[in-house]
Structures are given as C-alpha cells and as structure tokens.
Amino acid sequence: MSDSAFYQEHTLELIGLHDQVQTSVNLLDSLEGFLSKFQKDLSAVSGQISDLQNRSKDIDARLKSRRKIEKPLSNLLTEICIPPALATLILDTEVGEPWITGIQDFEGHLLALEPRTKLKSVKDLSSLGEGLRIVAATKLRLFFLNLLTPIKTSMSTNLPVLQNSILLKYRPLYVFLLRHVPDVAAEIQRAYTGATRTYYETGFRRYLRTLTAVKSRSSERSESIAAPPKMEEPDVDWDRLANATLEGSAATLAYMTEDKAFKEPTEALFRSMMMTLLDNSTVEYAFVVKFFTKDPSPPPPRSPLVSPTTPRSFMRRDSGAGQESTFDADEATPRAKQMQVLHEEGVSKEDKAAAEGIWKHIFDPVLQYCDNFLKTILDSSPVVTPLLTMIRLNDAIISECSVRDCPPLESFAFGLRLVMWPVLQKDITGQVDSLKKLIDSTTAGYLTKVTIKDNHVQAIARRYAVLFASWTALTVDEEAMIFSNLGRLRQELSRLITMQANKIKDPAQNASYLVALYEIILHFFSSQSNGRISTHPKAQSEISFWREKEDQARRRIQSIRK
C-alpha cells in the first residue's frame, strides 16, 4: 500500500490527532500565561508577606517598648491621680488619725503634680489638688486651734500630755501646712506661743506668790560673825546644804503652802523655784524644737519618673534623700520611725535659733518673775551659807541645762550666777570687816573701847568652824574665791585669838590659854565636819594650820618650864 493511500485511509484520525495537538498547544499557551500571571501574583504576595513581616517586627518592637514603660507609666498615673477615697477623706471627714497617712499621701500627689502643671492632661488634676489643699488647710487650721483651747481655758490642763500624746502625734499635719500653707502654719505657731505664754505666766505667778508667802513666815537674816555670843550657837545644817543639789527631796508643792505653819528655808524655796523652772522650760524647749523646726526636705516621691515626652523616651528623676519627721513613738509606718531617728540626730543652727526665739517669747514673763523672786531674797540680806547653797544649786542647774540641751535656760542661769556672786562677795567681805572692826575696837579710846570676853572669842571660832565646814562641803574643787575669803577670815580670827591671849601677861599662862583655845577650835572642826569633809584637801590644810598653832603653843610652854 502506498503512502498516499495510507494517509487517505487515516485522514480522519490524523485530523483528530492534529486537533488534539493544537488543543494541547493552546492549553500549554494558556497554562504558560496562567503560570506567568501566577508567578507575578506570587511575587506580589511575597512582597506583601515581607512587608507584613517588617510591620510585625515593628509592632513587636513597639509592644516591647510599651511593656517597658507600662509599669512606670502606671506608677506615674497612680502618683498624679488623686484617689477618690483620699478626696473623700479630705472633703467629707473631720481631722483625725486617718489624716496622718492621708495627708502624707496627698502631699506626695501634690509634689508629683507640681512639675507637670504645663501639661494639658494634668491641668484639671492640678486644679483639683489645689482645691483639696485649700480645704485641708482650712480644716487643719481649725483642728490645731481647737487643740489649743484647753491651754487657754484651764490651768489644770496637763500640758506635757497634750504635747506628747496629741500635738506630736499630729505633727505631720503641721509639717504639711509648713510646706504648703506657711501662713496658716505661722498662725498656729503664734496661737501656740500666745496660749502657752499665758499658761506658764499664770502658773508661775501663782506658784511664786505662794513661795513668797512662805518666805515671809521666816525672818532669817545675815548676822555678823563678830556678833555677841548666844545661848545656842547653830551647827552645820547638813539638811539645808542638801539644797545645793538636784537630787533629794522634791520641789515644794503649792498645796503644801496652804498650811500657815509650813516653813522652808530660803535656799529650799529658791531650789523649788529653779527645779520647777528647769523641768517646765526644758520640756517646753524640747517640744518646740521637735514640733516647730522644719524638716530637711519634703517627703521623697514614690516614683522616680516625670511625665514621658514621647512613647519611647522618658526621663528619670533623682530620688534624693527626702526625709519626713514624726515624733510619735507609736507611729505605724517604719519610714516614720526612721525619720524620727534622723530628726533626733541633729537640728540645724537656724532651727535652734528659731526655737530659742519661740522659747524666749513663751518664758519671758516667767523669767522676769524668777528674777524678781531672787531679788526679794537678795534684798533681805540672806545668810552667806544659804546664798552659797543657792549659787551651787544654780551651778547644778547650768550643768543640767547642758545635759538636756536647753541653751536659753542655761544663759538665764548664767545671768543669775553673775547676780549672786557679787552679793556673796560683798557679804563675806562684810563678815571680814566686822571682825576687823571688833578687833580694832579693843584698842580704841577709853570711851569707845570694847572688852571681849573669852566666850565671845569661842563663839566666833565656832561660827568660823561652821562656816568653813559648810563652805568646804559646798565646794568640790579648790575654788580660789571661796578659800581666799575663808583665808581672810582665818587671818582675822588668828589675830583676835593672839590679841585675846596677849591680855595675859604671864608667858606660861598665855601659852596655856592658846593651847586650850586651839584645842577648842580643833574640836569645833571635828564636830562640825562630822567626817564628811575630812578628805577635802582644804579641810586637811585648815586642820593642819590650827594643829601647828597648838604645837607652837605647847613648845612655848615646854620652853618656859625649862
């Protein structure tokens, strides 16, 4: 079979096969176009996926940034946003113990708002804070003024209890006023100083009036050592010398003076006045320092943040060393107790000066009354030994003021010392002069000549022994002023004894008289010292002086007999 016949025979099959091939080619062309389009779409999708990946990374980074500032931002919002409960406390409740912590929290919010007032979102909160500040100041002003009412209305008010149990407990509220409403704080300070000034002035005026009445019941006056002898010569009164110290009996109480028979020596009354002044004034000064002095700085902010300027950047504030002070030992918060310790570690010179100014304003009338009472004592010519007892007590007051850290009272006591010492010097000089005058009168003319008897000399020697024992007991150190004056008296006494002995012309009897008189003087020293001053160097020196005099007289007797 020829090829032509073969193709003719299979024409239809070949045509069908051609059509199928053509269809396949068309399908391949279509598939190629589809694949090309798919490739383009796939490239586009790949670009979108890459873009989504980049966006995802950016979102993830932003999320991490948000998470980093989430807690600080939350703290910041907590810090600047005033809780409704706190606003309710200030607006709807009376001032009480809950206000102590509430005002401290409120102050923290005010301090947080203060540097951010220019931010629009904070302006409304700042207005709210300012309103609450005004309300709090108004309520606190009335609260503190009402606390002072008992001081103004009754002298039976226990001022230390009011100070320590109430005022110091609420001191954080006053500190808030001092920082944020200084005018109100100044008004409260003036009200307190005015009330306590009247309180102390009235109390001390009444008390010193009773002491003056007791003083008028006794007529003890300074007597000359050269006065004529008495039936009974006084011994060293060790009980009265005990008034030179702060230890021992308590101060005289006002009700005790209502008994018309009640009497106290002058130095005991002075001691009562000074001990009462010491206790009241040092307690008051300590309170003034604790309550009215400024704290070093406001309380530290709760968060180290200030407002963030952008979502990703924010600044930190230095936390500083803010301190908050309270003096209530029962304060609940540990930070308050820590601040109490910090406060008590030291007070600045400026604060101390301010405290002294407040103290002086309160106690000026009291100090004037005390000055006047001392003046009445000094004007009544006090006995020299009670006067030295008062000086020694005043020295003890000065030392105690230093221990209690009360400089203004210490200065006042120094002033009293400067007043009393010249009077004592004048009195002891008068004693020496009176003895000189007595001795000189024995050698005067016939009309003015005085004859001194032996019992008069013995009385003078006894008084000298009493004076020496008393002054030595009151003088721990070898104080030059004291013992130089006693030395002057001893010199005149020795001259008097020699002059009296010279009346005896017989040398042996003269020496025997001196021996007998020196023995009496040594006996006086032994009996008056009562073993209490035997170890004092000056007492030993004094006894040695008179014993040497006695030995000299005995040697004269032996020399004459030979």
Image (cartoon, helix red, strand yellow):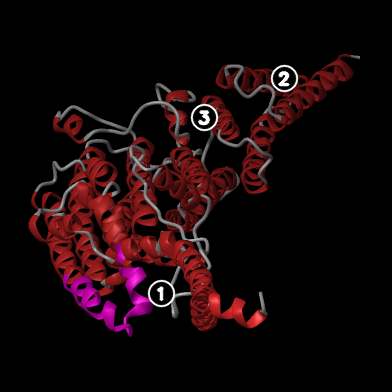
Residue that sits furthest to the front in the current view:
1
> What residue sits right under mark 2 in the picture?
515
Q: Secondary structure at mark 3?
A: helix
Q: Which residues are drawn in magenta?
A: 107-131
In the figure, residue 295 lies in which quadrant?
Answer: bottom left
In the image, which disc is placed on residue 456? Answer: 3
Q: Secondary structure at mark 2?
A: helix
In the image, which disc is placed on residue 146? Answer: none
User: Looking at the image, which residue is at 12% across and 49% down?
Assistant: 150
Q: Depth check: 10 or 178 in front?
A: 10
Q: Residues within 10 Å of mark 2 (few under 14, many from 20)?
A: many
Estimate the spatial distance between the alpha carbons at disc 3 and disc 1, rounded to whole Å.
97 Å
Dominant secondary structure of the magenta stretch?
helix
> What residue sits right under mark 1 in the picture?
307
Side (left or right) of 553 relative to 143: right
Q: Which mark is nearer the camera, 3 or 1?
A: 1
Q: Secondary structure at mark 1?
A: loop
Estimate the spatial distance between the alpha carbons at disc 1 and disc 2, rounded to whole Å.
101 Å
Instruction: Tell me if I can see residue 193 in this picture.
Output: yes
